[in-house]
Image (cartoon, rainbow, N blue to C red):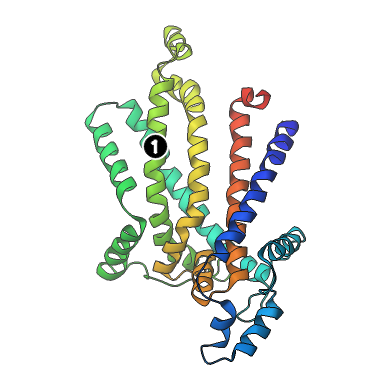
């Protein structure tokens, strides 16, 4: 297992290098001059040129990239051009909020999708299966921003049960923290639950047609025991992959959701940086997001290998 983990980790390094090129290149393509934006339209060309020189923006692009990559290798993401604050510090301050929101959303999605997927497979082609399929397809089709607005209208405006926006740190007031994050977490968790429900249903139906399941039935093992002992474990293999992809996607989806519910997380930091053309912050946030997705993918591979040991020898 350790050898598999090391091989898998090393195989991601070239991809990560390509990601750094893409992140740096895409940020360079953004319109506008950061120096001009910071100094204002009334700044003299000499002042703009001096600021560009101090920021290193007058250097050739390849030189800028390798200087940035060297800093990243030393875990130095630079400083915000807006207020000279450390980008690493800004990310460290905002990232826990988004991670908490993502974990909360994944817990909600698992609480919904596991029983729904299993029940849908056990009651194949019944009215229960059709109802769950309809709800799952609706959850996949519904845009998260529309769902968020719908939840605010229902639970904040009509019923006045939950505040529409705001944030309190968990250590300051755990109860209010979870209450304020409930609607954003449901907004992110419902579409994920819908996808996982469909994956689990399909996987369960496929597994239940295998020979070893028929053998278990022939030995007199009860239907529920066959379903949970022999079927569910093998059915979870593709679901684990889908779970990892969805978790990585939550970090990107949180950008819109955090804006809707005024959650001061990673997404809002990125949006603010784009509006102020703060290149170091944009590069840092996008790079950390990409690394987080790779890390989730790596953990998913380990879980995949733990569930199916044959994966380790491929």
Rendering coords of residue 117 (x, y %): 38, 34
In the displayed structure, 124 sits above or below 65; it is above
In the displayed structure, 181 sits above or below 107; it is below
285 on left or right of 208: right
Tell me the residue at 51%/27% (across/down).
233
Tell me the residue at 50%/58% (across/down).
101
Depth order, front residue of 229/5: 5
Q: Secondary structure at mark 1?
A: helix
Rendering coords of residue 142 (x, y %): 30, 51
Depth order, front residue of 123/79: 79
In the displayed structure, 49 sits above or below 313; it is below
Depth order, front residue of 23/306: 23
Rendering coords of residue 162 (x, y %): 36, 67
Quadrant placement of the C terminus: top right
Label 1 crowding class (10 Å Cα cut-off): few <14, some 14-19, many 20+? Answer: few
Tell me the residue at 61%/36% (across/down).
301
187 on left or right of 89: left
Rendering coords of residue 169 (x, y %): 55, 69
In the displayed structure, 110 sits above or below 254; it is above
Depth order, front residue of 30/216: 30
Residue indicated by mark 1: 115
């Amino acid at each position: 297992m350790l050898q598999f983990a090391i091989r898998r980790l090393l195989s991601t390094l070239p991809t990560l290098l390509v990601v750094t090129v893409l992140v740096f290149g895409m940020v360079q393509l953004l319109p506008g001059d950061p120096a001009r934006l910071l100094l204002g339209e009334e700044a003299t060309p000499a002042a703009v040129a001096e600021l560009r020189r101090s920021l290193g923006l007058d250097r050739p692009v390849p030189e800028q990239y390798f200087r940035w990559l060297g800093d990243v290798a030393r875990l130095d993401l630079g400083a915000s051009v807006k207020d000279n604050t450390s980008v690493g510090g800004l990310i460290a301050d905002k990232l826990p909020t988004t991670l908490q929101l993502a974990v909360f959303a994944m817990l909600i999605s698992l609480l919904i999708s596991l029983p729904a997927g299993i029940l849908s497979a056990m009651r194949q082609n019944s009215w229960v299966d059709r109802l769950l399929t309809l709800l799952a397809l609706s959850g996949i089709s519904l845009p998260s921003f529309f769902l968020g607005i719908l939840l605010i209208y229902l639970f904040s405006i009509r019923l006045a049960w939950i505040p529409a926006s705001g944030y309190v740190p968990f250590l300051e007031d755990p109860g209010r923290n979870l209450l304020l994050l409930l609607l954003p977490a449901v907004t992110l968790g419902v579409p994920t639950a819908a996808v996982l429900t469909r994956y689990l249903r399909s996987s369960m139906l496929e597994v239940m047609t295998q020979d070893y399941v028929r053998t278990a039935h022939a030995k007199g093992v009860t239907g529920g025991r066959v379903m949970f002992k022999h079927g569910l474990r093998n059915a979870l293999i593709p679901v684990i992959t889908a779970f990892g992809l969805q978790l990585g996607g939550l970090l990107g989806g949180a950008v819109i959701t955090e804006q809707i519910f005024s959650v001061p997380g990673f997404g809002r930091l990125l949006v603010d940086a784009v509006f102020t053309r703060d290149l170091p912050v944009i590069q840092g946030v996008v790079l950390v997001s990409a690394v987080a997705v790779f890390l989730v993918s790596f953990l998913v591979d380990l879980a995949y290998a733990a569930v199916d040991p044959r994966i380790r020898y491929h």
